[in-house]
Image (cartoon, rainbow, N blue to C red):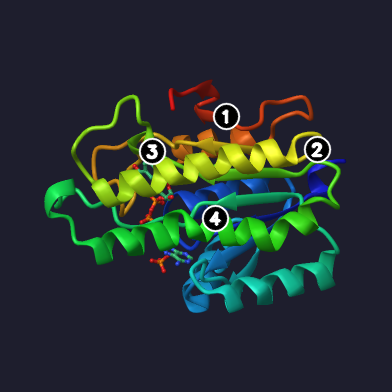
Amino acid sequence: MTQAQRIAIVTGANRGIGLEVVRQLAHKGMTVILGSRDLEKGTAAAAKLADEGLQVIPRHLNVTDPDSIAQLATQVEQEFGRLDVLVNNAGILYDTWQQASNANLDTVQEAIATNTFGPWRMCKAFVPLLRRSQQGRIVNVSSEAGSLTSMGGTAPAYSVSKTALNAFTRTLAAELKGSGILVNSICPGWVATDMGGAGGRPVEDGAASIVWGVMLPDNGPTGGFFRDGKPLPW
Ligand code: NAP
């Protein structure tokens, strides 16, 4: 299968790392669906890429809304009949302002709803379409903040949501072993976006770390945790 034949979805792609992942996949010739919970923002982001000569498909997608996910799954099935790449990038609440002992549990729940259940819901909806691909790839955009090995006291909601996402990656990868669908958690590193703030590395580098997981060969790893193509400790 050539890159030009691959159909990809990136969630939370109207800005930040997601938008740059869309740009890099479109550069490779893939048909890329730019998911955005605010379609106007998604359409504006796609228009910017069109100015660079890249045609991508903006679609409404709120990863906490089952109806929004189901609607996109129906559209993708009708238009393409399958999906090749799912990048679960949408993420929120790097809650550096709270600690475990004083955390607002509504905030924790909100983080888990987007960062953990979002990718989980997306996989439930799209694995049937990924099974029709010859080269299915799922990248769950995680963070070293979710690594139990190096876990500190900061950002408890975010950290716990990403640890749970990593566990989900393991269970799904094991389930899908032998299906041709590779499932990995990937950390983009500290990246200078709205979430990461100033001082992080360029968004191009963070996105490249993610794109590595999309471009894995058929005998590539599954059920792993990586940054820049190198394993990270769980
Ligand atoms: P960002 O600049 O804050 O962008 C987050 C994106 O997610 C936005 O497009 C946002 O849409 C979208 N989003 C949030 N909730 C959503 C929902 N319910 N449905 C659909 N989209 C939703 O963040 P980023 O730095 O690019 O981060 C991207 C991913 O990388 C996240 O998973 C993050 O945890 C991970 N990460 C980032 C860093 C870093 O240093 N930046 C480090 C490690 C991991 P709106 O514009 O509508 O808000």
Q: Position of residue 116 (x, y in %)?
A: 46, 54
Secondary structure beneath label 2: loop
Of residues 45 and 185, the one nearer the viewer is 185
Instruction: Look at 47% across and 75% down and name the residue there.
Output: 38
Image disc number at residue 180:
2
- The number of discs equals 4
Sequence-first tag of 4 and 2? 4
Counting residues from the start of the chain, the first of labels 3 and 1 encountered is 3
The residue at 13%/49% (across/down) is 101
The residue positioned 80% from the left and 38% from the top of the image is 180
- Kind of residue at disc 3: Pro
Label 1: how many Cα within 10 Å (few below 14, some 14–19, many 20+)? many
Residue 121 at x, y percent in the picture: 58, 62
**Which numbered disc, 1 or 2, marks the residue that appears first in the sequence?**
2
The residue that appears at 39% across and 57% down in the rendered structure is: 112
The residue nearer to you, when weighing 229 against 172, is 172
Check if mark 3's residue and mark 1's residue have beta carbons within 8 Å: no
Position of the N terminus by quadrant? top right
Query: Which amino acid, mark 2?
Result: Gly
Q: Are marks 4 and 1 in contact (CB under 8 Å)?
A: no
* Numbered tag placed on residue 224 in the rendering: 1
Task: Write down the residue under mark 4.
Answer: 119
Query: Separation of disc 3 and disc 1 at Cα?
Result: 24 Å
> Quick one: label 4, few (<14), some, or many (20+) residues within 10 Å?
many
Looking at the picture, which amino acid does disc 4 mark?
Answer: Pro
Earlier-in-chain disc, 4 versus 1: 4
Foreground disc of the pair 3, 4: 4
**In the figure, is residue 164 to the left or right of 119?**
left
Is 205 on the left-hand or right-hand side of 66? left
Does residue 60 lie above or below 206 as drawn? below
From what the image shows, is residue 76 above or below residue 229? below
